[in-house]
Image (cartoon, helix red, strand yellow):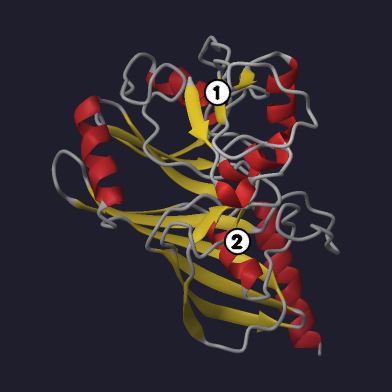
Amino acid sequence: MNKIHVDTKYVGKRIDAYLAETTELSRTNIQRLIENKKILVNDKNPKMSYKIQLNDEITIEEEKAKEISLEAQDIPIEVLYEDKDIIVVNKPKGMVVHPANGNPDGTLVNAVMAICKDSLSGIGGEIRPGIVHRLDKDTSGIIIIAKNDKAHINMSEQIKNHEVEKTYIALVKGFVKENEATINMPIGRSSRDRKKMAVDKNGKNAITHFKVIERFDKYTLLEVKIETGRTHQIRVHLTEIGYPIVGDTTYSNGKNEWNIQGQCLHAKSLKFKHPITGKEMFIEAPMPKYFEDIINELKQRKQNL
């Protein structure tokens, strides 16, 4: 149960618009909650068109997510490294990391469960066993999964303290003039679309470093390193400075000459300390074939100019 007291600047705003702006809920979810009488204003059911007043007390009874039964599934996945404490895999583009409503199975977790059986950290809960960090569905590349709680806690601390070096490869639209640069812009939930992130002065600190690997006609290949791990950070930052990632349908129109679905963004490597032995680890994930083919085609075009 979540209680909100309305202050002066929001007086007269429709309740669904107000809550979409000030909570993590989408406007569609809010409207559904109002219809299901899960949102009260001063202990009464409001109409959808209700305009909030000063000192209104809004109560939100959020619906619990449906429990999802988790099963091991024999899904082919490239294992880059494995020992008794961690497993490092190369996640393909299009695969969701863990089950959620709308993606009950076919996830990375389902695939890893088939490899590791019962040896996964339980810290992530039933739905996210062993998951220390994530990649977006359409971002390919390297990801670490913890096999026990001790490894999970240590890896989480390394990530929190910015001790894990994450390197990505991105193909962006446009000719990037700077050889290298740092983007330091806070990121928060978009006020226009709650499913998206945006640069927001009231958001959380977000730092992205990039350098040019190669320039092509109309495109630039970048190496990207992130200090922070905000949701969609690289995609938001590069779009904000005018260089959206090829194929990104969320932060640009996604249209591209190769008709690929999803962004050309690959988590290339991770540098970290082994969570149990303390040994320095550096692991790389080969790029997906479609990404390599695009780069090779662009290089060929460049030679033919």
Q: Position of residue 85 (x, y in %)?
A: 25, 31
Give the number of the disc on residue 282. none
Above or below: residue 170 compared with residue 58: below
| Secondary structure found at label 2 | helix
Task: Using residue 77 as the reference point, say whether residue 28 is left or right of it.
Answer: right
- Pointer 2: residues within 10 angstroms few (<14), some, or many (20+)? many
Residue type, label 2: Val
Q: Tell us which disc is closer to us: 2 or 1.
A: 1
Above or below: residue 222 compared with residue 186: below
Q: Which residue is mark 2?
A: 236
Above or below: residue 25 compared with residue 212: above
Between 90 and 157, the residue placed more toward the observer is 157
Above or below: residue 3 compared with residue 227: above
Q: Is any part of residue 239 visible from this angle?
A: yes
Q: Residue furthest front?
A: 54
Residue type, label 1: Thr
Task: Using residue 257 as the reference point, say whether residue 98 is left or right of it.
Answer: left
Task: Using residue 254 as the reference point, say whether residue 182 is left or right of it.
Answer: left
3D distance between C-alphas at marks 2 and 1: 33 Å
Q: Position of residue 282 (x, y in %)?
A: 31, 56
Task: Using residue 282 as the reference point, say whether residue 298 is left or right of it.
Answer: right
Image quarter in which the C terminus is found: bottom right
Q: Is any part of residue 94 visible from this angle?
A: no
Q: Which residue is mark 1?
A: 59
How many numbered marks does the figure carry?
2
Q: Residue furthest left?
A: 277
Q: Position of residue 61 (x, y in %)?
A: 55, 18
Between 286 and 63, the residue placed more toward the observer is 63
| Secondary structure found at label 1 | strand
Q: Position of residue 169 (x, y in %)?
A: 55, 64
Q: Quadrant of residue 294?
A: bottom right
Q: Earlier in the sequence, mark 2 or mark 1?
A: 1
